[in-house]
Image: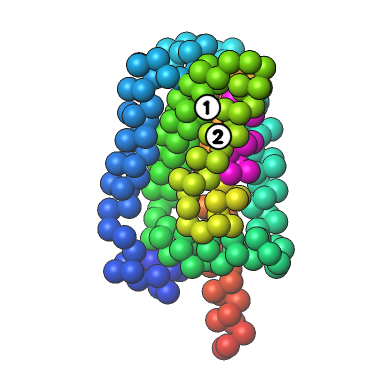
Amino acid sequence: MSDENNDEFPRENQPPNLMRLAILVEGGLALLAIFVGWLGFCAADQPLSQVDSTIISSAFIWAALGMLPMLLILVAMLRMDFGIFRTMRQTVDEMLVPLFAKCTVLDILLISVLAGFGEELFFRWCLQGGLAALISGPNGEVIALIVASVVFGLFHCINFSYIIVTTVIGLILGYMMIGSGTYLAPALAHGLYDFVALLYILKRANWVKNSQIEENS
């Protein structure tokens, strides 16, 4: 991600201290989740301290499988030129690419890890887990999954299309926590997906730019 490859995104057009902002927002969500969980509103059957090799192995397997539909959504967004996919691609090109264009691979990795664990601790372990415990009856888990996913989508309220797509991704991540029995599965999947998606999106932006330069030369 060298500066030479990203001259169309000058530093002054990017929000300053992106890493600091990520630490503040994502770290703040994690701290808030831990505090609310300490008060008892969380997935009580998944204590944060209960992490062993079996849980970690299961989480990685679920994360790898859970990333597949998320990556399919990414590919559809970048390749299909209609409806919600076109809108999403325009949003990515106009907002996310300039935002992350000057980031190094290490920057993107750290931001992805922060987003994965910060957001999943809050939206899945705390909100979804807490609602599932609060709502009695067989439908409590389903209602909690839907509510947490919608709130997750609204948290990413760049535009309506973005809300819809992130809500669907929230449903996938929420189901992963239910199926795996650990918040680590969606946290790992979220972080890995963000890392892969951001690297691919930025690489694609460079390919498009270089193609346009070659066509005009």
Is residue 10 one of those drawn in magenta?
A: no
Q: Quadrant of the N terminus?
A: bottom left
Query: Can I make out residue 123 in this image?
Result: yes
Q: Position of residue 136 (x, y in %)?
A: 58, 15
Look at 60% across and 50% down and name the residue there.
Answer: 164
Is residue 194 in view? no
Magenta stretch: includes residue 175:
yes
Numbered mark located on residue 22 in the image: none
Specify the quadrant of the image occupied by residue 49. top left
Segment tinted magenta in the rendering: 167-177
In the image: residue 70, left or right of residue 34? right
Q: Amino acid at mark 2?
A: Val
Return the residue nearer the eye: 60 or 180: 180
Do the numbered discs 1 and 2 sit on residues whose CB atoms are within 8 Å?
Answer: yes
Q: Main secondary structure of the magenta part?
A: helix
Q: Amino acid at mark 1?
A: Gln
At horizontal 61% and vertical 28% (from top left) the residue drawn is 143
Dot 2 alpha-carbon crowd within 10 angstroms: few under 14, some 14 to 19, many 20 or more: some
Q: CA distance from mark 1 to mark 2?
A: 8 Å
> Crowding near pointer 1: few (<14 within 10 Å), some, many (20+)?
many
Task: Return the mark for residue 147.
Answer: 2
Badge number at residue 128: 1
Q: Is residue 163 above or below residue 35?
A: below
Residue 39 image position (x, y, % from top left)? 35, 16
Residue 118 against residue 19 in the figure, above or below: above
The percent position of residue 40, horizontal first and vertical second, equals: 40, 15
Estimate the x, y position of residue 17 in percent, counting from the top left. 27, 53
> Which residue: 64% across, 66% down?
86
> Depth check: 117 or 170 in front?
170
The quadrant the C terminus occupies is: bottom right
Q: Residue at the location (51% across, 23% down)? A: 131
